């Protein structure tokens, strides 16, 4: 994971572990990180972001629980295979995606109007 860079806003009301989790989940779901891509170690990412290792470890645990990453001793932490897309939307999955986007947008400093505007623009482009 040399490129996409993660950003954590320590002044945000969104906890740092949630900012990391949401940004990585978004990178995985949008295929900017793909199956097999190696993530930095907990210690390395914590050092890069200036955070405690426990903060990054919590984000990684939540991503593992969501089956987005997998960690194996000796192989490191890698992006897991995404399940094939369902033909109909799952309300829980949709809510998770919305939460991920909102958390990432807030971490960038976007307010509610900017977030809603970005969603509207994306919906219009997809029509």
Image: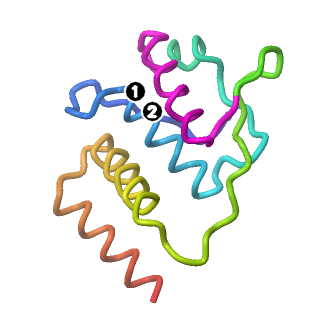
Above or below for 56 versus 90: above
The residue under the point 48% across, 27% down is 59
Q: Specify the quadrant of the image occupied by residue 43.
A: top right
- Residue positioned 65% across, 24% down in the render: 40
Tell how many labels.
Answer: 2
Residue closest to the eye, 109 or 29: 29
Quarter where residue 84 is shown? bottom right
5 in relation to 123, above or below = above
Tell me, yes or no, whether the two marked residues, 2 and 1, touch with CB atoms within 8 Å: yes
Residue beneath disc 1 = 17
**Tag 2 secondary structure:** helix
Residue at the extreme bottom of the image, as rendered: 127
Q: Which mark is residue 20?
A: 2
Q: Which residues are magenta?
A: 49-70
Which quadrant is the N terminus positioned in?
top right
Q: Indicate left or right for 16 with 14 as reference.
A: right
Residue at the image point whose x is 74% and y is 49% from the top:
81
Q: Where residue 121 appears, x then y in whole percent?
A: 34, 76
Q: Position of residue 46 (x, y in %)?
A: 50, 15
User: Residue 126: image x %, image y %?
Assistant: 47, 83
The CA distance from mark 2 to mark 1 is 5 Å
Q: Residue at the spot x=62%, y=42% of the render?
A: 68
In the rendering, at what x and y percent does residue 29 appear?
A: 58, 55
Residue 26 belongs to magenta span: no
Q: Would you say residue 67 sits in the magenta stretch?
A: yes
**Residue 112 found in image quarter:** bottom left
């Amino acid at each position: 994971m040399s490129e996409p860079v993660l950003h954590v806003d320590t002044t945000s009301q969104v906890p740092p572990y949630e900012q990391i989790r949401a940004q990585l989940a978004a990178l995985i779901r949008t295929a900017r990180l793909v199956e097999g891509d190696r993530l930095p170690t907990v210690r390395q990412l914590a050092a890069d972001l200036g955070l405690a290792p426990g903060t990054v470890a919590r984000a990684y645990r939540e991503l593992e629980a969501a089956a987005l990453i997998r960690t194996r001793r000796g192989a490191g932490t890698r992006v897991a295979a995404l399940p094939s897309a369902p033909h109909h939307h799952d309300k829980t999955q949709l809510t998770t995606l919305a939460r991920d986007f909102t958390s990432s947008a807030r971490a960038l400093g976007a307010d509610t109007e900017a977030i809603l505007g970005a969603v509207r623009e994306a919906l219009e482009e997809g029509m």
